[in-house]
Image (cartoon, rainbow, N blue to C red):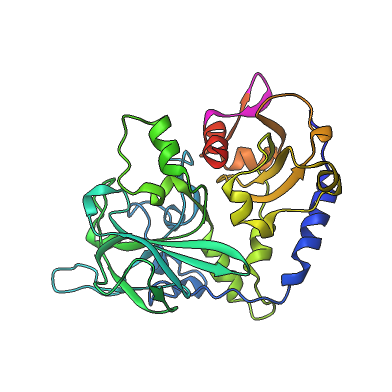
Amino acid sequence: MLPHPSRRLFAALLLLASSASLFAQSPFQFPTANHALYEPGQELKFFAPTAPDKPWTSGSYGCVRNYATRMHEGLDIKHLQTDRRGEPTDPVLATADGTVAYFSTKAGLSNYGKYIVIRHIVEGLEIYSLYAHLSAVDPGLKLGGAVKAGDVIGTMGRTSTAEVIAKDRAHVHFELNVFVNDHFATWFKKTSPTERNDHGIWNGQNLLGLDPREVLIAEHNPAKKFSLLDYVRGQTELCRVLVRVKDFPYVKRYAPLVLKNPVADKEGIAGYELALTYNGVPFALYPRAASEIKGAAKFQLLSVNAPVAEANPCRKLVVQRGGHWQLGDKGRELLEMLTD
């Protein structure tokens, strides 16, 4: 196994790297008028579960679908108002200042139905908010156009190709994501030549979700100012992997997540050691010199946080075979998509 810093040293490096942002404030707001997340014990007022007999957690983030076998990358925020036909009419709001990256008004082309993606820069990080299952996109929305937090960008609906969303669980599916790779469309065409990709780089596979619930709750804590950068840097680690690739777009886009390594500074970078969440978000990138890398494999699994892997199995990024942890097919696919 490739020698690498201990967890204690890695955590210390993360803490040191985040010290400059201790007093920053994240700008994210609720994407609708439903703020019941802050009412203790009233989760069913905020989340839309997948069925009446399912818990509210099925509308939250994580391995919460199909008996923990399917990932849900956002929050399903329940409607508050309807018209005479029972259809939702809640305005959907931009969660923060940003620019319109993409929107689709064709409900039949995605599991998201009609959806919008907005780009935000927060503490040097590119974060993309996504709003799905809309009945309508605001006609004044323009690609590249600026939006302010609280601007109306669409109307809540029930559009999707994956399911029939009943009127009583009408909701907006809300995500906060990192962006994987500018070359996604080319990678997808190469790896899935018989499949359609109607949304180019704004295909949902090219966006990896963080937990918006944690962000919204942390921002509501008056005792501690919330820093999005610190939040991302402090994600819980599923595993650590080495990628023998010197340069790829994520490194430049998420430079605040790249840690210092004097050896690589001196000898040159031959690859990166990545800390991944169970949803695959690379939240710490440690450059490695050739002298620090053993073996010729393009990808190497260095360590696994077994309790996290066992509690969150839905993405199957790492799997156990013969009593040993290995990169799963999905893990390798993610790393190829990230570094291609």
* Residues drawn in magenta: 321-329
Say which quadrant the C terminus sits in. Answer: top right
Q: Is residue 138 left or right of residue 176?
A: left
Q: Is residue 195 left or right of residue 66?
A: left
- For the question of whether residue 281 can be seen, the reply is no
- For the question of whether residue 48 can be seen, the reply is yes
Give the x, y percent position of residue 222.
64, 81
Q: Where, by quadrant of the figure, is residue 211 drawn? A: bottom right
Q: Please name the residue shown 25% across and 48% down the image.
A: 109
| Frontmost residue, 192 versus 74 | 192
Residue furthest left in the image: 85
Up the image or down, 325 lies above or below 171; here it is above
Specify whether residue 324 is painted magenta: yes
Specify whether residue 273 is painted magenta: no
Give the x, y percent position of residue 99.
43, 70
| Frontmost residue, 339 versus 38 | 339
Give the x, y percent position of residue 138.
27, 72
